[in-house]
Amino acid sequence: MIYSRFYNIVLFAAAFFLIPYYAARIILTGKYRKSIGPKFGFIQPNVIEGMKGSPRIWVHAVSVGEVTAAAPVVSSLRKIFPHACIVLSTSTETGQEMARRIVPQATSFIYYPLDIPFVIRKVVNLVNPDIFVTVETEIWPNFIRICHEKGLKIVMVNGRISPRSFRRYLKTKFFWKKILALVDEAGMISEIDADRIKILGMETSRVHVMGNAKYDSLAAGADEALKKETAIKLNIDPASKVFVAGSTHEGEEKIVLRVYRKLLKEYPDLILIVIPRHIERREEALSCAGGEGFPDCITMTEINGGKKRTSERIIIIDVIGELFKVYSLATVVFCGGSLVPKGGQNILEPAAWGKVILYGPSMEDFADEKKLLEEAGAGMTVAGEEELLRRIRELLEAPETTSRKGKAGRKIVASNMGASRRYAEMIKNEIL
């Protein structure tokens, strides 16, 4: 109990400084405007009224990445419990948008409440779930404690703990051990993730290694119809050579653009598609392109608005939910968050389309996926700009070898399917 009081003192002290900051962001940019009310517990009555069915399962997925993992789990739950009320919550507005688009099996969609006791009690009473399911180790102390006090089962699925998060958790292990003791079952992606959560204090008998549900979502989603639809939308001939730089962070676009400029000397028809990790960096990406000598770019927003791509060599994807689709058109892929120290981004998405993926040395958050793809020859680490250029040239010069390696990576994704069903069975066992 003393730990909870200390946590809440720190939480409210932080809120004293953060509330003015976020209030300014809402007023000046409009960001968080849709979610701020629901996060304080103000949920529309029609949303609550729409929560019909039994059992009532609350699944929480923070943002876009977690929603991708949650989607096949929710689909598997719907098959087991056809009459269930499945409530899917997200913390971010982009995650909410994605959830509504790719998880039609959910009954209702809400925002996850702020970790403030009176807000949590209000929302939990409104939703009134039989079980709470958190995706990818999203643990908020007050929420978990209050759910436990109300007698709710608490289950973790697709659990993962990155090296950076693990180091942070270890510094306050005494605190997290108390919180993890309230979680009934934890399904983890890998043995490494399982070992980490055990070290943090989770009881061994409650920890299970079940695989990555994202494999199910991605393998099922990669089909030729989606590829054709995307090619038509972007006005790209299926035979065109396309360089896709996905989930790029600040500093990576400049490297990609410099590499692209050099490649154009050998492949003048090569198309570049850049997908910044955060769509609010759209103007920054456009400015960077202009600074590198490419002022004529087209954005996905413009294409969605009716503008047709004609002579533009560079496409900037500034819309949520397009990354996976665009990977289908790639001849070569660079996955960002890796040439800068961000821990990498999801390399399974392009792998599901049978692509060979290049990435920088910072892949700590996707070490298992990196190992699997490199063993198949479908993943390659590049140290920097020059090696990125060299590797892309090699891939473009040997299309048959590139295709063979990409297919091997796709088989890896397909062979790891089935985790979502295992997670759904674990949840069923806790409900029944």
Image (cartoon, grey):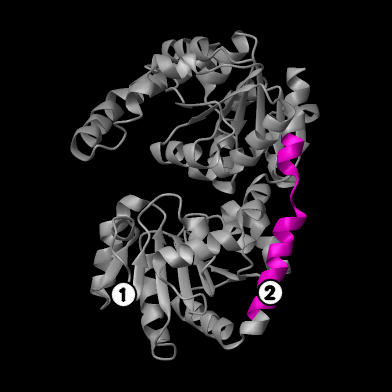
Label at residue 312? 1
Q: Residue furthest bottom?
A: 266
**Whole-Å distance between the Cαs marked 1 and 2?**
30 Å
Quarter of the image where one finds residue 300: bottom left
Q: Which residues are magenta?
A: 402-423
Q: Is residue 362 visible?
A: no
Q: Nearer the viewer, residue 70 or 53?
A: 53
Mark closer to the observer (1, 2): 1
Q: Quadrant of the N terminus?
A: top right
Residue 406 among those drawn in magenta: yes
- The residue that disc 2 covers is 405
Q: Nearer the viewer, residue 259 or 327?
A: 327
Q: Please, what is the dominant secondary structure of the magenta stretch? A: helix
- From this view, report whether residue 141 is shown above or below residue 306: above
Give the crowd class for mark 1: few <14, some 14-19, many >=20 residues within 10 Å. Answer: some
Residue 195 image offset from top left, x and y in percent = 73, 40
Q: Is residue 58 visible?
A: yes
Q: Residue at x 66, y 52 (%)?
A: 220
Residue 146 image offset from top left, x and y in percent = 55, 13
Q: Residue at x 24, y 29 (%)?
A: 23
Q: Residue at x 27, y 65 (%)?
A: 286
Q: Is 282 on the left-hand or right-hand side of 84?
A: left
Type of the residue with mark 2: Lys
Label at residue 411? none
